[in-house]
Amino acid sequence: MSKVVIEMSLSLDGFIAGPNDMPDQPFGGRNAQRLHDWLLVGPEPYKENAFFRPEGKNREFVDALFHTTGALLTGRRTYDLVNGWNGSHPIPGLPVVVLTHEPPADVPKGKSSFAFHTNVREAVDAAKILAKEKAVMVHGASTTQQLLAAGLADELRVHIAPLLLGDGRRLFERGAGDLPLEMIETIATPQAVHIHYRICP
Amino acid sequence: MSKVVIEMSLSLDGFIAGPNDMPDQPFGGRNAQRLHDWLLVGPEPYKENAFFRPEGKNREFVDALFHTTGALLTGRRTYDLVNGWNGSHPIPGLPVVVLTHEPPADVPKGKSSFAFHTNVREAVDAAKILAKEKAVMVHGASTTQQLLAAGLADELRVHIAPLLLGDGRRLFERGAGDLPLEMIETIATPQAVHIHYRICP
């Protein structure tokens, strides 16, 4: 059975983007591009996607992510900010499920398939089927909050970047409720501390 | 010269206490007592303070903390919640500086000295003098935010407990501004991931 893994980069003060995230500036301004340094700033391009440049332990982590991820579940905001990855998600051929109230009129053509769902449970089920025996990777603050509230996520992996952003979009808003986690693994690098948790039912 | 080190336990969603922190319930309800499991839940009492029960890497961390800390700088809220540690801070003989608009009429008598300051810069200076060559440990969300805003803190050590609390008092509110950090050390334990940062000027 496919696992559902929330996968998000955030600042130590809990922001996943600066206050002004828009297609021209998807990270939202301030120092928010540094949230993704662990993935994007290194001496050489990643073998499967030259936009990525992880190094050392970050590269090993990305290797594992590329090989264990079978589908992406994301929110409409992320999808719009990156224009649907122009049709091809960075993980080659990765199918994408988008949680949205209204599917877009046009979908960019590329190597990824796209499905649109309004119901969070149906979106998760669709992503699990697409992922086959691999994991469903979840992106987006609103999608994360909806999955946590509905008890639909199995694991949570945060990449805590070394900065205080001071403003922007929070991964966790008030109201999430009391939820115990169990730490599975921590990988510390200068660009991010990756902490992998099991979400306790 | 004495270093100023912010030292706080928080949940993964950024809360340092639950929504109802009061003297009878200093952690604020919900699962917030779990924020301090790394310090309080272990098989045997700590040698210098039987209320603490850290084990393994957490015990080593507490050993280092006890030996390198020369003074505490804290806010009035923390001071009131614990009734001034009844006069004796858990680190034996540790002098305490409290940032407050109005000093309390009575101060509990014990092994710690207490000083009260209204001005954040004066409070930091007083704590540095008391700490001598050791570090000033800083507690409290408001105190943390004031020190960060004034550029008066050198380092930041967070103890991220494995839970989502969903509500309560945040360590970092909006408005802190853009502040790069540099990761010095990460210690992962089942009860907390300790991340030590240098605050970049």
Image (cartoon, coloured by chain):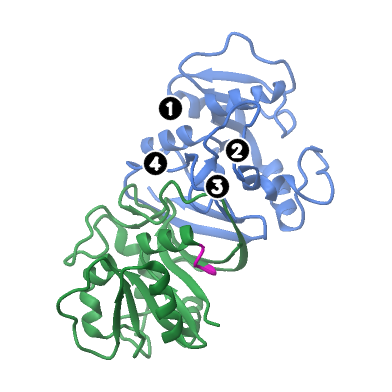
Chain colours: A green, B blue
* Residue B119 x/y as whole percent: 43, 22
Name above or below for residue B64 compared with residue A147: above
Residues at marks 2 and 4, CA–CA distance in whole angstroms:
20 Å
- Please indicate, yes or no, whether residue A110 appears anywhere in the rendered image: yes
Secondary structure, mark 3, is strand
Residue B112 placement: quadrant:
top right
Q: Amino acid at mark 2?
A: Gly
Where does label 2 land, which residue? B29
User: On the same chain: label 4 and label 1?
Assistant: yes
Closer to viewer: mark 2 or mark 1: 2
Viewer-side residue, A93 vs A36: A93
* Pointers 3 and 1 in contact (C-beta within 8 Å): no
Q: Chain of mark 3?
A: B
Where does label 1 land, which residue? B121
Name above or below for residue A17 compared with residue A138: above
Residues at marks 3 and 2, CA–CA distance in whole angstroms:
14 Å
**Left or right for B182, reference B56:** left
Where does label 4 land, which residue? B173
Q: Amino acid at mark 3?
A: Leu
